[in-house]
Amino acid sequence: MEKSENMSRGDILVIKDLRVWHPVRKLLSIVGYVRAVDGVTFNIPRGRIVAIVGESGCGKTTLARAIMGLIPATSGSIIFEGRDLTKLPRTIIRKWYTGQVGLVQQDPYAAMPPFMTVKGILEEPMKIHGIPKEERSKRVREMLTEVGLTPPEDFVFKYPHMLSGGQLQRVAIARALILRPKLVIADEPVSMLDASVRIEILTMFRELKEKYDLTVIYITHDFATAKHFSDEIMVMYAGQIVEIGDARDIIKKPKHPYTEALISVLPDPDPQNRFTIKKTLPGEPPSLINPPPGCRLWPRCPYVMDKCKREEPSLIEIQDGRKVKCWLYA
Ligand SMILES: Nc1ncnc2c1ncn2[C@@H]1O[C@H](COP(=O)(O)OP(=O)(O)OP(=O)(O)O)[C@@H](O)[C@H]1O
Ligand SMILES: [Mg+2]
């Protein structure tokens, strides 16, 4: 397998100009494409928690599924540990890559086979990777303890419908970690849970990240949890990344008009300001079948200029580690 020369040191994952378009079919012909991920470039430094934040439908799950190798890239590269996934044969992806990257999905009930016990669910990936029976049983007990489902004997023979949403999401995290991956993609792992359980699970996840030396991509529509849980934030709008930076810096001083609008509607801890009118963007995100020319935000942007309607800005670095895709900064 060829090692990519362009991989910067310390990055576990490098995404280059990735496009993932879903075909829209009418009868047997393709009549268009949903450009769910459309020209995305970023890198994930080893050992960090990077949040991808964006509204519903902006392409977060499509991006996660493409990185997992579950759907094909339309174009561009997904370079993991120096190897371009888009050029690897399916057998290598199944035998090697699926052990390196774990996925926690948004809806734990939909993600778990209802007819399998917790033990069966956790053992399945290990069977595919040829891990012997004794080791499998040991790891199942170990991981259940790690995710706080103790004693493990009380959980191994339960079926998904016998567990609460929080318990099931703990099983999902155990399954994602059971092959000892290097990278975990958590797609809205707590969005369906109660607020109190959310914090508990994210705190546990952070501890597991330290213990197992993981890199985490945390996908969410919620800036508040991204701020507490992640080191870095990438903001996604209409299939593209519009801003990247240190989590606390972005929240304190957003640069892109879209980030600014999302952050302005976060609840204000100051009771004096809690009920002041916030900046919101008019209108809706654009159609991803027929996105507007130029910058995709221009029909909603309070700072729109003529150029924005014609030419697409690039994502450029404006200061240490902060990248913005906006003509205001070009
Ligand atoms: N298999 C598919 N075929 C056609 N279009 C799809 C498919 N999967 C997703 N889409 C479309 O692609 C766009 C991005 O969807 P995606 O699920 O990636 O967004 P998301 O950011 O994860 O949204 P959410 O926050 O609601 O989970 C949406 O317009 C969606 O309707
Ligand atoms: Mg999603």
Image: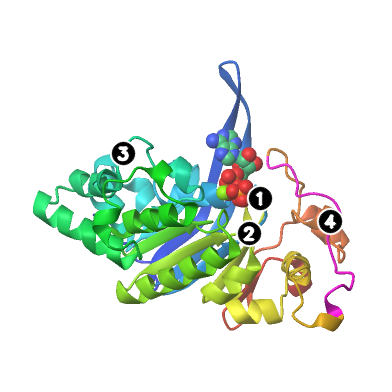
- Of residues 215 and 288, the one drawn nearer to the viewer in this rendering: 215
Relative to residue 76, is residue 262 depicted above or below?
below
Q: Amino acid at mark 2?
A: His
**Which of the two labelled residues, at mark 1 and mark 3, occupies the earlier sequence position?**
1
At a point 58% along the width and 53% down the height, the residue shown is 39
Judge depth for marks 2 and 4 and give the one in front: 2
Mark 4, Cα crowd under 10 Å, few <14 / some 14-19 / many 20+, is some
- Of residues 196 and 276, the one drawn nearer to the viewer in this rendering: 196
Numbered tag placed on residue 116 in the rendering: 3
Ligand 1 is found in the corner quadrant, namely: top right
Numbered tag placed on residue 250 in the rendering: none
Relative to residue 118, is residue 280 depicted above or below?
below
Residue at mark 2: C-beta within 8 A of ligand 1: yes
At a point 27% along the width and 62% down the height, the residue shown is 151
Does the magenta segment cover residue 282? yes
Residue 309 placed where, x, y %?
82, 54
Judge depth for marks 4 and 3 and give the one in front: 3
Gap in angstroms between the C-alphas marked 3 and 2: 31 Å
Does the magenta segment cover residue 50? no
Q: Which residue is mark 1?
A: 56
**Which of the two labelled residues, at mark 2 and mark 4, occupies the earlier sequence position?**
2
Residue at mark 4: C-beta within 8 A of ligand 1: no
Residue 152 placed where, x, y %?
26, 59
Numbered tag placed on residue 221 in the rendering: 2
Q: Amino acid at mark 4?
A: Arg
At a point 29% along the width and 58% down the height, the residue shown is 100
At a point 61% along the width and 81% down the height, the residue shown is 248
Q: What predominant SS class does the magenta segment belong to?
A: loop
In the rendered structure, the answer to whether residue 267 lies left or right of residue 177 reads: right
